[in-house]
Amino acid sequence: MLKRIQRSVEFIKSKINFEPEVGIILGSGLGNLVKEIIIQKTIPYKEIQDFPISTVEGHEGNLIFGTLSGRNIIAMQGRFHYYEGHSMDDVTLPVRVMKQLGIKLLIVSNASGGMNPDFKIGDIMLIKDHINLMPNPLIGKNEKSLGERFPDMSEAYDRRILNEARTIAKELNIKVHEGVYAGVTGPTFETPSEYRYFRIIGADAVGMSTVPEVIVARHMKLPVFALSVITDLGIANQVETVSHQEVLEAAANTQPKMTAIIKQLLTKKDIF
Ligand code: HPA
């Protein structure tokens, strides 16, 4: 794994002259933030030998280097999911690579199904914690140079940044919820009983990504800020059919608000 990280980092460094401060993972239907970036360089995943190929509609596969709100960032336009058949090492490789490239903060976005009865389609949920219902990406020999064997998870989502994001949303007049994200493998959406179960165990939203990336980031002590766009509802007696297309559309409608929060967050000089 270290070899794959190192090879990817060296390849990327040979293509850019750039010190990134922040990594941003753009979720399903949430790739439009890229239009706001002053782009210096785009590297398709397929040019990076060790990167897997993303196979899902709505997920382009590019690493984008540029500035957003005056900050040097790397944006991942499209991510890798466990349900595509990638290993957890594959799913999380880009996070490890971005850390080695120098990022000090990871911002993660996703589309998710809402179980909290206060949620509506198109709402934003700032993630304050998660419940991991996928295989843990750190299973296997621990790579000491990356982090410790038993990483602490008491504050997986940086509280100071979360507080800042809440204030920003208020200032921008954007309604946001805060809640717990349950990470599942997919690719099936949930049965009504599964949505009820995830609600009972304490989750507000459920989705098929984010948690592996966050675990790997925290293993490396990288601070994380994450947010979900609620694209469908799994609320008791309100569960309707859901399709990937609906998820993409709902995400697309909400992405300007998500982009506004992230852009404003990056203007804050002292958050990390
Ligand atoms: N469940 C799981 N993953 C999802 C959902 C959902 O309802 N919506 C978007 N991603």
Image: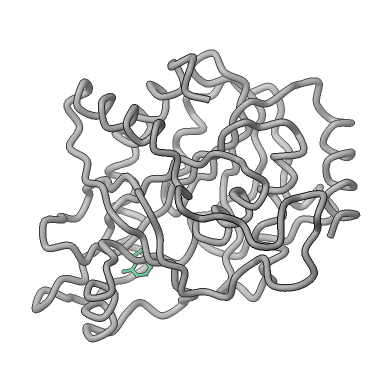
Residue 240 on image: x %, y %: 18, 75
Q: In this view, does 217 lie above or below 63?
A: below
Horizontal placement of 107 versus 1: left or right?
left
The one of 122 and 107 positioned closer to us in this rendering:
107
Measuring 21% from the left and 71% from the top, which residue is drawn there?
234
Identify the image quadrant of the N terminus: bottom right
Residue 166 on image: x %, y %: 27, 32
Measuring 27% from the left and 55% from the top, which residue is drawn there?
230
Measuring 22% from the left and 83% from the top, which residue is drawn there?
192
Residue 82 on image: x %, y %: 59, 70
Q: In this view, does 66 lie above or below 215?
A: above
Horizontal placement of 166 versus 35: left or right?
left
Quadrant of the rendered structure where residue 196 is? Answer: bottom left
Please count the marks in the image: 0
Measuring 47% from the left and 23% from the top, which residue is drawn there?
271
Q: What coloring was used for the rendering?
A: one colour
Q: In this view, does 150 lie above or below 43?
A: below
The one of 138 and 196 positioned closer to us in this rendering:
138
Residue 152 on image: x %, y %: 56, 55
Q: In this view, does 24 lie above or below 90?
A: above
Quadrant in which ligand 1 is drawn: bottom left
Horizontal placement of 69 versus 39: left or right?
left
The one of 160 and 241 positioned closer to us in this rendering:
160
Quadrant of the rendered structure where residue 141 is? Answer: bottom right
